[in-house]
Amino acid sequence: MSHQDDWLTVLREHRDAHGNGPTAAKIKYSATTVSQVLSGKYLGDIKAIKQAVEGALMGMTVDCPVIGDLPRNVCLDYQRRSFAATNHVRVALSRACPTCKHRRGAA
């Protein structure tokens, strides 16, 4: 297995130790998604799953231009949140995320 597939090993080991449901909850995806990813049948954004695993299960962090150092999965969670003009952090994120190198789908 290549170094690039380490996240799959970590996901599989966590699922084997804790079960599909708790693993899915930890990375904030469904149990079905975890099952499909591990069986090689997931057709969605595999890069986003990889990033969620790296943050939630492997401790990977990113340097957010708004918040600073935070786990990769938390970065993805912030990106999913809707805009709220009453929340200064979400306003700042709405400006920074579209051009951030850590945004979902960025190369």
Image: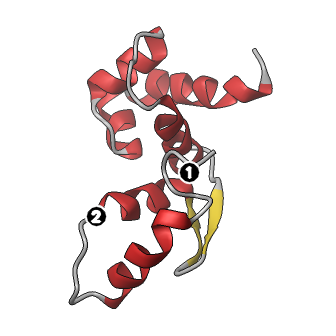
Q: State the image coordinates of residue 107 (x, y, percent, origin top left).
A: 63, 45
Q: State the image coordinates of residue 102 (x, y, percent, origin top left).
A: 58, 58
* Left-right relation of 62 to 4: left
The part of the image, by quadrant, that contains residue 18 is: top left
Q: How is the image coloured?
A: secondary structure
Q: State the image coordinates of residue 89 (x, y, percent, origin top left).
A: 38, 84
Residue position marked by numbered label 1 in the rendering: 55
Identified by mark 2, the residue type is Arg
Q: Which mark, residue 81?
A: 2
Q: Could you give the CA–CA distance between mark 2 and mark 1, rounded to whole angstroms?
A: 17 Å
- Say whether disc 2 or disc 1 marks the residue closer to the N-terminus: 1
Q: In which quarter of the image is the N terminus?
A: top right
Q: Is residue 8 above or below residue 99?
A: above
Identified by mark 1, the residue type is Gly
Q: State the image coordinates of residue 90 (x, y, percent, origin top left).
A: 34, 79
Residue in view at x 37 percent, y 16 percent = 36
Residue in view at x 57 percent, y 49 percent = 106
Residue in view at x 78 percent, y 27 percent = 3
